[in-house]
Amino acid sequence: MVVALILAVGVWMQVGERIALDTTYHAPNPAPDRIDVRATVQRVDAAARELTLRVMVTPRGRLAEEDGLLTSQDLVLRTSQDVRGDLTFPAHTRVDAKDVPVALAGGAVTDYPFDEYATDIAFSATADGAAVPVSMTLVNVDALFAIDVDAANEHGVAGFDLGVQRSRTVLLFAVFMIVAMWALAIAVFIGAKVMVGGRRGLVWPALGWMAATLFALAAFRNTAPGNPPIGSLLDYLAFLWAEAIVAICLTAAVFAGAVVESRTDAGPA
C-alpha cells in the first residue's frame, strides 16, 4: 500500500511537470495582416545570467508568400532591451528560426536551489518601414527551470514578463541531497563515537566506509542538476558541513584507534 502511494505521488508530480512544460502562453492579436512569433525558451544558463530563446517568425496575410514560408516585404522584428539584437528578414527570403540570447536580472546562482530571475521579452515589427501588429506565443522546454508569465499585447506590441526559477523536480532533488548529506554525516559521527568510546582500535572496514563516504559526498554533490558553483546555498546548508564532520570523525577514529592499538601492543607479554 505504501509503495503504491509513493508511486502514485511520483506519477502525479511527473504529470505536473509535463503539464508545465506543455503550457503555451499567448499574447494574441487578431489582425489578418500580422506577424506571428513563436518563442521557445530552449535553455536557461543561470551562471551566465541569460536564457536562449528560439524565435520562429511567420508572416500572415499580405505580408506572406507561400503560406508564410517567405516574407513579401523587408521585415524587421524589434525586441525589448533584455533581448540582445533585432531580427531582420529581407523580402522574398525564407524565414528561418533564430536563437537569440536574453539577459536575466535579479537573483544569484549561489542561491541554488532557491535562485530566481526575471526578464522582459517584447517584440514589435515593421514591414518596409511601416509598423505591423505582432501576435506571440511562448513555451518553455528547459526541464530544469519553471517560468511564471504575465502576457500583454498593446498597440500591436506583444510582450511577456517572465519569472524564472528552478523546477519543482530540481528543488525536491536538491532538498533530498541536503537531507541525505546530513544523514550520512550523522551516521559517520555515530560510528566514530562507538569506535572511540568503545576503544575498538583500528576497525579497518569502518574506517574504509568513512573514507569512502568522504569522497562519495563530493561525487554526490557534483550530481546536483544545473551544476551549481561551489559556494552555493547547497554547500553552506549541507555539503561543507557534512565533509567537515566526516573528515573530523575519520581523523579522530584513526588517532584514537592508533592509541588503543599501541597500548595493546605494549601490554604484558
Image (cartoon, rainbow, N blue to C red):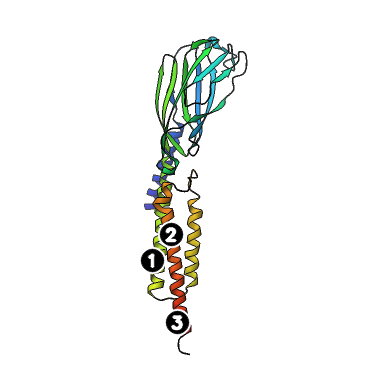
Question: Tag 2, which secondary structure?
Answer: helix
| Mark 2 or mark 1: whose residue is earlier in sequence | 1
Question: Which structural element holds mark 3?
Answer: helix
Secondary structure beneath dot 1 equals helix
Residue 163's x, y, as percent?
A: 40, 32
Q: Which residue is mark 1?
A: 190
Residue 42, image x, y percentages: 52, 32
- Residues tagged 2 and 3 counted as in contact (Cβ below 8 A): no
Whether residue 112 is visible here, answered yes or no, is no
Q: CA distance from mark 3 to mark 1?
A: 24 Å
Q: Residues within 10 Å of mark 1 (few under 14, many from 20)?
A: few
Instruction: Find residue 263 and name its label.
Output: 3
Which x, y percent locates residue 32? Answer: 48, 11
- Name the residue beneath numbered marker 2: 244
Viewer can see residue 251 = yes
In the depicted structure, whether residue 117 falls above or below residue 88: below
Q: How many marks?
A: 3
Q: Amino acid at mark 3?
A: Arg
User: How far, Cα to Cα, is label 2 from label 3?
Assistant: 29 Å
Q: Amino acid at mark 2?
A: Ala
| Amino acid type, mark 1 | Ile
For residue 177, the mark is: none
Mark 3 closeness class: few <14, some 14–19, many ≥20 residues within 10 Å: few
